[in-house]
Image (cartoon, grey):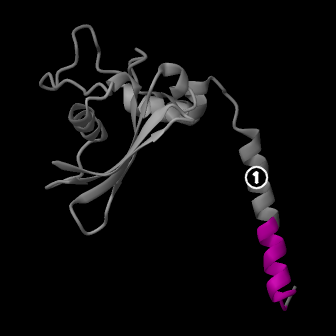
Amino acid sequence: MEVDMIEDKENPLLNRREIRFKVSYQGPTPARQDVRSKIIAMLNLDKELTLLDKLDPQQGSQVALGYLKSYGDKAAMSIEPEYLLKRNFEVKEEPKEDGGSPPSGDDGGSPDGEGESGGDKAAAEGGDAKSEKSGAGKPDEKAEKDDEKGEDKAKAGSEDETGPKEGE
């Protein structure tokens, strides 16, 4: 992976450094965290104050264009949306491969320990998995109303478009 800087400018109003770059790579698009780490190392930036805002792979080539922001302090970084902070600072835990056997004491059921999967239990009782998990034992009234409206519109639409049918 090779990173080339396109633009590096200071934004004193927002107390940040804005960096536009181009990443050349072989194979699949590199992970956002890998690109972010490489640029932080190249430019000697503080990893706690640096956000990778955008990484846009270019169709038909092994190139991605990106936009990175490096703030002067945490207070200045407070203007960033929550999803962007999560995307940059929360590390996703990768599932460990233990060979496929469940941990001891687990009966192979659902994670909530019911023994049956939520969908199987709900299907056996005549409900759906969503209503079972939410604790709602009765059908969704809004869905029923929507279904009724849809049927009424379908009837009205068929009469409007074709007119009354012969023989009725």
Residue in the picture at 24% in, 26% down: 95
Closer-to-camera residue (129/87): 87
The spot of residue 26 in percent (x, y) is: 13, 55
The spot of residue 75 in percent (x, y) is: 54, 21
Q: Quadrant of the C terminus?
A: bottom right
Q: Element under label 1?
A: helix
Residue in the picture at 34% in, 21% down: 109
Residue in the picture at 29% in, 24% down: 93
Closer-to-camera residue (126/81): 81
Q: Is residue 161 magenta?
A: yes
Q: Residue furthest bottom?
A: 166
Q: Is residue 21 left or right of residue 132?
A: left
Q: Residue furthest top?
A: 105
Secondary structure that dominates the magenta span:
helix
Q: Amino acid at mark 1?
A: Asp
The spot of residue 161 in percent (x, y) is: 80, 85
Q: Is residue 137 left or right of residue 151?
A: left
- Magenta residues span 153-166
Quarter of the image for residue 59 reads bottom left
Closer-to-camera residue (142/77): 77
Q: Is residue 40 above or below residue 144?
A: above
Label 1 crowd (10 A; few <14 / some 14-19 / many >=20) = few
Residue to which mark 1 is pinned = 146
Q: Is residue 53 left or right of residue 164?
A: left
Q: Is residue 160 magenta?
A: yes
Q: Is residue 69 left or right of residue 162?
A: left
Residue in the picture at 26% in, 38% down: 39
Quarter of the image for residue 78 reads top right
* Tally of numbered tags: 1
